[in-house]
Image (cartoon, grey):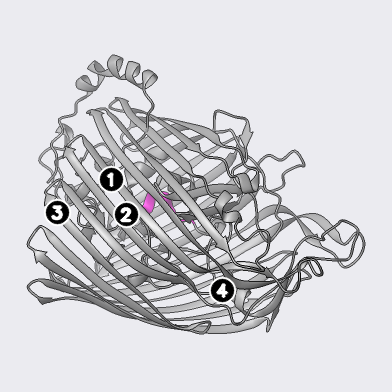
Amino acid sequence: MFSRLARSQATARSRMAASVLAVLCATHVSYAQPPDMESSSDPFVAEEAEGQEILDMDIEQLSRVDVVVPALDVEVTTVARQESTVGRSPAAVFVITPEMIRRSGATSIPELLRMVPGLDVARIDANKWAISSRGFNGRFANKLLVQIDGRTVYTPLFAGVYWDEQDTLLADVERIEVIRGPGATVWGANAVNGVINIITKHARDTHGAYLEMGGGTEERDFASLRYGNRTENGIDYRFYGKYFNRDAAFSPLGAHDNWRIGRGGFRMDWAVDPCQVDHVTFQGDYYHGPAGQTHTIPAAAAPYQETITETQTKEGSNLLARWTRTIDEDSDLSLQFYYDHSGFLDSAAGFLQDVYDADFQRRFRWTRRQQIIWGLGYRAVKLHTTPTFSLVMDPVGRRTDLYSAFVQDEITLVEDRLYFTAGCKGERNDFTGYEFQPTARLLWLPGKRASAWAACSRAVRTPSMVESQHGRLLELPAMPGTPTWPTLWANPDLRSEELLAYELGYRAQPSDAFSWDLALFYNVYDRLRTFDFVNDPLIDPLTFRISNNMAGETYGAEFAWTWKVTPCWRLSGNYTYLQMQLHAGAGAGPTSENAEGENAHNKVFLQSSWDLNYDLEFDVIARYVDSLPALGIPHYISLDLRLGWRPYENLELSLVGQNLLQPHHPEFAGEFINVRNTEVQRGVYAKAVWRY
């Protein structure tokens, strides 16, 4: 059900004085579940567009319509690989919609993820990020699965994500679904602590021209262009290109981490038959650009270490094809293929990888009370590493194969009240053999405006190539001027890390203006990765081997809320609490339990979105992040401001200030590869967007 909102220019101006006082006296933030105006199917529109159906509107009309979707009715597909809503999802789920993206002032995907409860998002330098869910954060965090339009953006080199390679035109994003907690039953290994699914818009929703340009102190200059249309035979398509040039961050030793990259791509969507039973999607992307960095590497000659400044060139491309057949409301099937190529080379390491992936999914109603979804998958990865003095793998090239199958059954225990979901995914990988990842979830709907859920799940994180292949990784010399390096050896017998997760959640929308969501979790880990001494640490303190020599528990709470104070003013926020308790075994290295101090215990996010009048917007975003004692990072508070103005129907201008409270502040530090971490600087930029 959608709320009806009468919103006129005169009403907005009459509330302006009261809203100004409220903004100055309150702590604010943007609404947590704002509407997805371009994908809603039956909303009420404002006076100017009244009488038109939402699907008949173009982008320009939609951009001036205030559509209100109840928080529990926001669409999600990631939890069970089928269409559902937040209220019907037995998992901790958060959705970032186009309106949230537009009003955030963010220019990258990692910046957008800062608004999600339960996620740790920190910048290491101007082009490197550390992002994780519910702990274990780091540049090479390996317990979070990330997808873009069904393509897993994952590197088998360390089983994680290079965030500096992941981007798209943000104006084309339909929504970003974030699941905190295990999603391995349907998505497989490495979906241990969460899943991020970035879904772009159907090509039919991006007809016309879009131009975005801007620049400032840190975002030096950027530009994006997109054009979409429909062919005579009914194929919707779009092409896009974007470029940005970001300034180096701050370091008292000097920062050389400036970053520029160009990216382009396309998407085509085709309803094959007039009845729209069969749909075909074909899309692809290409990117290329340099990123600067300063790091210290071992050297063969005195003084046996070298600090260098260099440019690392990033390059990659991908192609994806998907066929979907809709049989009826409760039955469909899909088949997807994609190819992904990426790589880089610098003085510390280098690799090239090719990923070939095939996925089949079938959904049907088995009985009146049972909805079945099952699927099969295959992935082949070819990885080639370039030996350097810091990193040696034997052999330098390797191919791995992954076979998988899953099934999930949603059982209606009480119609419109109680649902039970059980499922399991089985995988066969080249590192640890067979892995099974089951889940059991219970959903209770006490009313139309509330839902409660509970879950118990098992998930595993399989070893990466750099961990399990014969090889070594050299760190810094123990003492400058000595030819002795700490050496880390891989372990071909490494086993999967294991998680047993217990979760509870409750969400409610007591009124059209207010909603809240609470998730509690308790995670039990076993066989966590450690760097163990190969010999007696008193005899040989510099040689380590990767092992499964640590267990631990994490627990915490994630609370999010949104409040529409007036028709012109929305507040939202979230609070995250995390506690980690790790227990390393005998012989584990001295840094094994460092993760306890590398993740913030407390985080707060607040946003206020205020419409000053019909064509003028003001947004305030504040964040608090606790200290990271293991990295020597103090707590910090950041403040972002955005002023948006629409002088014409097709033109939007905005002025954004980011990290305004301090000239600069650190957020994280590098790991393994000794990249010099830099500090995030205060920045201001201006942007113009034109649509036609």
Residue 169 magenta-highlighted: yes
Q: Are marks 2 and 1 in contact (CB under 8 Å)?
A: yes
The amino acid type of the residue labelled 2 equals Ala
Local crowd at mark 2 within 10 Å, few (<14), some, or many (≥20)?
Answer: many
Residue under numbered circle 3:
445
The residue under the point 16% across, 56% down is 444
Image quarter (top left, top right, bottom left or bottom right) of the C terminus: top left
x and y percent of residue 365 in the render? 13, 75
Q: Earlier in the sequence, mark 2 or mark 1?
A: 2
Q: Residue at x 26, y 41 (%)?
A: 516
- The x and y percentages for residue 142 are 52, 64
Q: Which residue in the structure is indicated by mark 4?
A: 464
Please give left or right for residue 674 compared with residue 191 in the image: right
Question: Which residue was labeled with disc 1?
Answer: 517
Q: Earlier in the sequence, mark 1 or mark 3?
A: 3
Q: Residues within 10 Å of mark 1 (few under 14, many from 20)?
A: many
Whole-angstrom CA distance, mark 2 to mark 3, is 15 Å
Location of residue 279 by image quarter = bottom left
Position of residue 82 measured from the top left corner of the image (x, y, whole percent) = 24, 66
CB-based contact (under 8 Å), mark 1 and mark 3 = no
